[in-house]
Image (cartoon, helix red, strand yellow):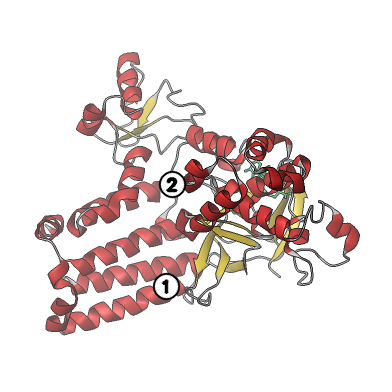
Amino acid sequence: MVVREAWRPEVGRYLEVSRAVRAGELLFQEEPLFLSSRVESVALVEELFDDLQEEAWSLPLATQVFLCVLKELLDSGGQGSEAGSVAAGCACEASACEACPKLEKLAYLKGHVGKWHSSAMMLYQGLKAQVAERVSSERFEELYATCATNAHEADGGDGAALFLKGSMAEHSCRPTAFKQIRAGSGSVPQGETRLVVHALRDLDVGEAISISYIPEYYPTWLRQSMLQHGFNFQCGCERCLSGGAELCCCFVCPECEGPCCPPGAVYEEGAYELLRCEDCGLELHDTELLGALKRAERCEEFATTMSGKLHPYHFKIFHMYLKHLDQVPAGTALQILPQLQEAFHRLRPVEKGHPLHAQLAQCAAECWEKVEDEEQEAGLAWLRAAELYDLCAGPASADAAQCCRAAQRATASGQNDATWRGHTGSGMDEVGRRDAESARR
Ligand SMILES: C[S@@+](CC[C@H](N)C(=O)[O-])C[C@H]1O[C@@H](n2cnc3c(N)ncnc32)[C@H](O)[C@@H]1O
């Protein structure tokens, strides 16, 4: 076993490596204890609640997975096992015991009951009377807190899951590992879902396995606020505490158009009095100018924002492009992608490996495939994506292997132009083709 449990006062239980591991190594994989899709949650809302129907399609992660747990509790005929009964009733190691029912295994996880009290009680009020009769408010609250403290996103953000081991991993805004939730792809058989966790860098024995619960490209104040509101804890990771330059709050230098950032961490939106240009060293502290930049950052002046106050490295620009890449023509996406790659490289150097770098490279390869007569570029781009997946999850990883196969396919298609055109050429729109040509120039 590469992974073992440890404890420290700031985070409670967490995972660490029990031997030295290399970047890209598989740390563990596991099946979910509970897994729910959005559609299942909506059906459960109708079955169990009086008045949540309108919100059913936008339930938070915690509530989604909690509904599955509640259903299991009702199906098991009552209160189920109370927290702690695993240790009392079963001599096994709860997370591994096949014989233990799911609710007993769940008791292995802990939740912050006090922190989730009001959310749990609001839900409890909405229960149908016959459900409330069968579940005490204390049991309800305890289970809700366990779900809220430990839920993971699944199904590309459309589902929610609870994992026994994965839920022990602490959060870091500069994590040492990354998680993927794979459904029926790579080494995961059809019809199954698994959490797969790989090391993002070399780890010495005893180093913590941390994953990021939120995107890493947000500034300190936004990461802290998302963790506080979405996960109910104050992040104490090394990146938040180090107070380093706020690279994601990046403005255009009025002197040289280079990236200008606050030189130290920013813990509240707009709470900086100085920006420093990384290229020419210019220091901006003019109150009026800073005020205009802060308004632009809050998108109060969208037109002026677009006219060049926010640098392309700014997290709002990065986020907007990342989320909408699939809606722009391939040629335009090929112009945007290098900017995204550069922006993320400042946070996570590409040579160190990160799944987002690999995903951006894969996206570039997919775009090159859509551009007519660019089979060679597509082949090279697929190889680059394979190389980056290899860096973060090893050459045997499903993603690296898939990109290698795509590279071979693109190269083979390039050698048989007629086949290639028949395959994709007709789908390419004229604007995208022109964009791609200008991007190449
Ligand atoms: C998924 S649980 C981790 C397992 C939990 N420690 C246990 O004993 O069951 C997440 C909780 O760990 C703590 N935690 C994780 N990462 C943290 C961080 N970076 N800073 C502060 N607390 C953190 C928070 O209390 C959070 O609610």
Viewer-side residue, 243 vs 310 = 310
Kind of residue at badge 1: Ala
Residue 230 found in image quarter: top right
Viewer-side residue, 61 vs 366 = 61
Residue behind mark 1: 400
State whether residue 299 is above or below residue 312.
above
Q: Give percent across and percent down for residue 400.
A: 42, 72
Check disc 2 and report its element: helix, strand or loop. Answer: helix
* Residue that appears at 50% across and 46% down: 56
* Label ID, residue 304: none
Q: Is mark 1 within 8 Å of ligand 1?
A: no
Where is ligand 1, by quadrant?
top right
Residue behind mark 2: 347
Check disc 1 and report its element: helix, strand or loop. Answer: helix
From the image, which quarter does the C terminus lie in? Answer: bottom left
Residue 403 found in image quarter: bottom left
Kind of residue at badge 2: Leu
From the image, which quarter does the N terminus lie in? Answer: bottom right
* Residue that appears at 36% across and 77% down: 404
* Residue that appears at 36% across and 27% down: 298
| 2 vs 1, front mark | 1
Viewer-side residue, 46 vs 392 = 46
Position of 106 compared to 151: left or right?
right
Question: Does the rendering let one see residue 2?
Answer: yes
Q: Give percent across and percent down for residue 137.
A: 75, 40
Q: CA distance from mark 2 to mark 1?
A: 23 Å
Label located before the other in sequence (2 or 1): 2
Question: Does the rendering let one see residue 208?
Answer: no
Q: Give percent across and percent down for residue 180.
A: 52, 62
Q: Give percent across and percent down for residue 32.
A: 62, 64
